Amino acid sequence: MKCAKCGQPLEADMPCPNCTDDNVRVMSRAEKDSYDGITIEADENEARRREEAEQEGRAYQYGGQRVYVRHVNLGQIGWKAKLLVALVGLGLSIFFLPLALAFISIAVVLWILGKFIR
């Protein structure tokens, strides 16, 4: 492992002997928003509130934003029911998609004819 600040080799879980950087610090709000890695929650109360809200399915406040958590549980659905839902969806899309395309095509042709007639 290398030190993030000076690039010198480090031993596992030890601070850097060259720059005495322990590679842990509190991030600013902008850094938190743009950071894509794993972080440690500095405020345990915030983490606990978020976890409780997720379990209860209600909204909680995160910074200046309100976050809504919704869980949808369809129960224990077997593979036969899932297959049936997929086949019904496929059948509906096979029927309605060409119908919608036909209506759109007719509307476009009528619009073009309307432009030529004027």
Image: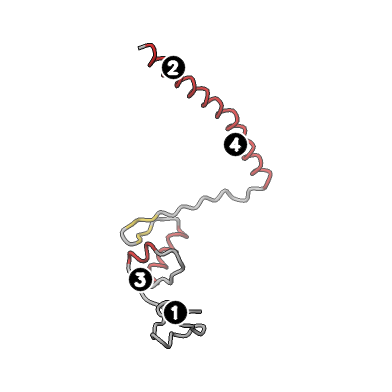
Which residue matches tag 1? 7
Where is residue 110? Give x, y as percent.
44, 17
Q: Residues within 10 Å of mark 1 (few under 14, many from 20)?
A: few
Q: What percent of the width, then of the height, locates residue 29?
A: 33, 66
Q: Is residue 117 above or below residue 32?
A: above
Q: CA distance from mark 1 to mark 2?
A: 69 Å
Distance between mark 2 and mark 3 Cα atoms? 60 Å
| C-alpha distance separating marks 4 and 2 | 31 Å
Q: Is residue 82 placed above or below 53 in the rendered structure?
A: above
Q: Secondary structure at mark 3?
A: loop
Mark with earlier residue (1, 2):
1
Give the Cα distance between marks 3 and 1: 21 Å
Q: Earlier in the sequence, mark 2 or mark 3?
A: 3
Left or right: 81, with 63 as reference point? right
Task: Name the residue beneath numbered marker 2.
Answer: 110
Left or right: where 67 falls relative to 99: left
Residue drawn where x is 59% and y is 28% of the image: 95
Residue type at mark 1?
Gly
Residue for badge 4 = 89
Residue in the image at 46% along x and 52% along y: 70
